[in-house]
Image (tube, rainbow, N blue to C red):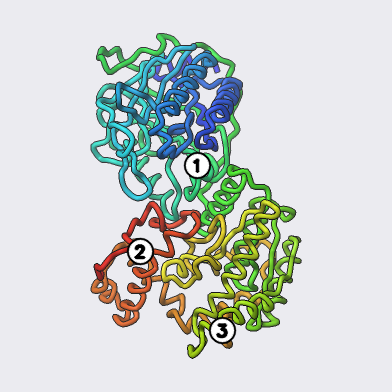
């Protein structure tokens, strides 16, 4: 190590060891987040790290939403920052927190060294689109900062700061920064990782700086943070990558040009000399990006696991129909929290087929979960008997169909209340989009795991999971989808086949294309018009549905905020 340092000194270069703490924070758990940060600081010290860096708003968790409107919450977070400063020794620490200046608050990063908060950077680019609404809470930062750390000039930026061509990084590089720490709480959706890494590489090459990008990991309500922190050099070449969807302390050695002496009010001196440390040899490894289906599957598992655990649940209950959607939800649940914590309930009616019960039971046996059969026929007959005088002269229709779904919803909620189980709903994005679901029926529950997963993707994910071991019965893949609420019912009686439906939903919901533009893509105008009408008329249902995991570029909820009362026709 000494010989390496001497050789670098002759070349006017320095080697810096950084430790990037890709941690899973819990919103509002200031003490728990503090404990996790402190533990990772100690682990970074053991690795001989010169600088340890943590994600955006690591002290508060992300996104804190309207907790930020509570003055005491902001004050408490500042108190934990001060407590954190007291435990920082010879490894400098960069950590995200909420700063307060007068009546304004800022999304901020503190640079701490030897018990002192040396400087605070305020995020300069606030995202206010999609799931982000930071302008609701924060004020933009006024100027970039650079920190002098021995012979190294580094700068700190926060998430969105990186995504603009006129990024604060450009100004920081002009001030002499050779290393940019970009701290993040960047939520996952399919395809985002490549887009993100392309931006990081471009900014590194454009500004001739190395970039250490540290991301949050874990589930928070409908969001999943994928981690996948990376370090690139000033040519955009990958130095190291952290794993996806896992906590990790990623250590890397970066060679940087030695800093030239500069003077500016925006350059903050942290220390004149970096202390010598015992630096154990780092393990060499290559982490490759996940395949797209694996990536989505792992996002769903982590999002589900964290929603259950962070909200204090131990077990879940699922209505098993014998179909593909409930099968996928059950497998995800077992992968998330283990077979002993999952109960499947099959609730047959007069319209349920023998094959459905066989498939539901076989799935439960394959998973090793508890399996209950609760027939709904007597309850259904009681409803029909009570309602028959009021339904007199009317032909059976969707009212009788939805009664069955609502009976099932009541049964699952009864089990939830009695045993403290979380009810997982099984509706997919295709159904939620078109309203092909029963309010207070199959939509009743606490968490909608596959709410943002189109039906065609449900099949692909189930196929992927079966490739790891045959769990879902083969017939579940091949039989025609049906709600089994009336004789010989099929989903295609009401909806176009999913291979035609899902592409139309994607361009309408995720790309905001109108009827004319969608039709110009080669879709039948009558079919498109029918689908768009179904989507628009179902907004009131979606507003009352449980939260679900975001895995597409635009999910229902924060991503897409349409009025319920709406006369506009696309």
Residue 282, by quadrant, is top right
Q: Is residue 106 left or right of residue 461?
A: left
Q: Which residue is mark 1?
A: 227
Q: Nearer the viewer, residue 169 or 252?
A: 169
Label whose residue precedes the other's in the sequence (3 or 2): 3
Which residue is drawn at the image coordinates 59% and 59% (left, top)? 424
Residue 532, by quadrant, is bottom left
Alpha-carbon distance for marks 3 and 1? 56 Å
Q: Which residue is mark 2?
A: 509
Which residue is drawn at the image coordinates 37% and 33% (left, top)? 158
Q: Whole-percent x and y of residue 85? A: 49, 16
Q: Whole-percent x and y of residue 306? A: 58, 45
Crowdedness near tag 2: few (<14), some (14–19) or many (≥20) residues, C-alpha within 10 Å: some
Q: Whole-percent x and y of residue 366? A: 74, 65
Which residue is drawn at the image coordinates 68% and 59% (left, top)? 415
Label whose residue precedes the other's in the sequence (2 or 1): 1
Q: Secondary structure at mark 2?
A: helix
In front of the other: label 3 or label 1?
Answer: 3
Residue 287, visible in the rendered structure? no
Which corner quadrant holds the C terminus?
bottom left
Q: How many marks?
A: 3
Which residue is drawn at the image coordinates 45% and 49% (left, top)? 188
Label whose residue precedes the other's in the sequence (3 or 1): 1
Considering only vertical position in the picture, is 293 above or below 63? below
Q: Secondary structure at mark 1?
A: loop
Q: Secondary structure at mark 3?
A: loop
Q: Nearer the viewer, residue 485 or 258?
A: 485
Q: Which residue is mark 3?
A: 388
Alpha-carbon distance for marks 3 and 2? 40 Å
Alpha-carbon distance for marks 2 and 1? 27 Å
Residue 108, by quadrant, is top left
Crowdedness near tag 1: few (<14), some (14–19) or many (≥20) residues, C-alpha within 10 Å: many
């Amino acid at each position: 190590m000494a010989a390496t340092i001497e050789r670098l000194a002759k070349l006017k270069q320095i080697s810096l060891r950084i430790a990037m703490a890709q941690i899973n924070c819990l919103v509002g758990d200031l003490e728990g987040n503090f404990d996790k940060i402190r533990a990772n600081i100690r682990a970074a010290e053991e690795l001989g790290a010169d600088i340890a860096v943590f994600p955006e708003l690591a002290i508060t968790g992300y996104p804190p939403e309207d907790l930020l409107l509570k003055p005491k919450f902001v004050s408490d977070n500042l108190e934990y920052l001060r407590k954190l400063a007291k435990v920082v020794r010879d490894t400098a620490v960069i950590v995200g927190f909420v700063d307060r200046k007068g009546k304004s608050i800022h999304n901020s990063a503190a640079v701490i060294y030897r018990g002192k908060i040396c400087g605070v950077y305020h995020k300069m680019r606030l995202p206010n689109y999609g799931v982000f609404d930071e302008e609701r809470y924060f004020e933009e930062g006024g100027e970039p900062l650079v920190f002098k750390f021995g012979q190294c000039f580094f700068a700190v930026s926060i998430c969105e700061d990186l995504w603009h061509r006129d990024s604060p990084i450009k100004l920081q590089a002009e001030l002499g920064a050779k290393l940019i720490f970009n701290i993040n709480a960047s939520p996952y959706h399919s395809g985002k990782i490549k887009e993100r890494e392309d931006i990081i590489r471009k900014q590194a090459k454009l500004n001739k700086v190395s970039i250490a990008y540290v991301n949050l990991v874990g589930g928070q309500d409908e969001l999943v943070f994928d981690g996948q922190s990376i370090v690139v050099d000033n040519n955009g070449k990958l130095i190291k990558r952290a794993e996806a969807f896992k906590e990790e302390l990623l250590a890397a050695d970066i060679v940087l040009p030695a800093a030239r002496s500069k003077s500016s009010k925006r350059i903050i001196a942290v220390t004149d000399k970096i202390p010598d440390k015992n630096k154990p040899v780092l393990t060499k490894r290559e982490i490759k990006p996940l395949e797209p289906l694996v990536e989505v599957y792992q996002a769903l598992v982590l999002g589900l696991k964290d929603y259950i655990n962070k909200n204090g649940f131990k077990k879940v209950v699922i209505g098993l129909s014998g179909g593909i959607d409930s099968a996928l939800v059950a497998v995800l649940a077992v992968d998330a929290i283990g077979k002993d914590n999952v109960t499947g309930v099959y609730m047959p009616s007069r319209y349920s087929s023998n094959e459905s019960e066989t498939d539901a039971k076989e799935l439960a046996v394959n998973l090793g979960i508890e399996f209950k059969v609760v027939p709904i026929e007597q309850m259904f007959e009681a409803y029909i008997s009570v309602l028959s005088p009021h339904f007199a002269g009317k032909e059976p229709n969707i009212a009788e169909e939805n009664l069955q779904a609502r009976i099932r919803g009541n049964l699952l909620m009864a089990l939830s209340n009695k045993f403290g189980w979380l009810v997982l709903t099984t509706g997919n994005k295709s159904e939620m989009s078109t309203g092909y679901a029963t309010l207070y029926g199959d939509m009743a529950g606490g968490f909608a795991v596959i709410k943002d997963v189109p039906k065609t993707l449900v099949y692909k994910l189930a196929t992927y999971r079966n490739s790891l071991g045959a769990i879902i019965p083969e017939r579940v893949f091949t039989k025609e989808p049906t709600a089994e609420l009336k004789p010989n019912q099929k989903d295609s009686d009401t909806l176009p086949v999913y291979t035609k439906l899902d592409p139309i939903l994607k361009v309408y919901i995720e790309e905001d294309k109108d009827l004319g533009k969608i039709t110009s893509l080669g879709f039948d105008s009558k079919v498109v018009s029918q689908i768009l009408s179904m989507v628009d008329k179902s907004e009131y249902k979606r507003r009352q549905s449980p939260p679900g995991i975001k895995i597409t570029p635009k999910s229902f909820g924060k991503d897409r905020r349409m009025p319920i009362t709406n006369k506009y026709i696309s």
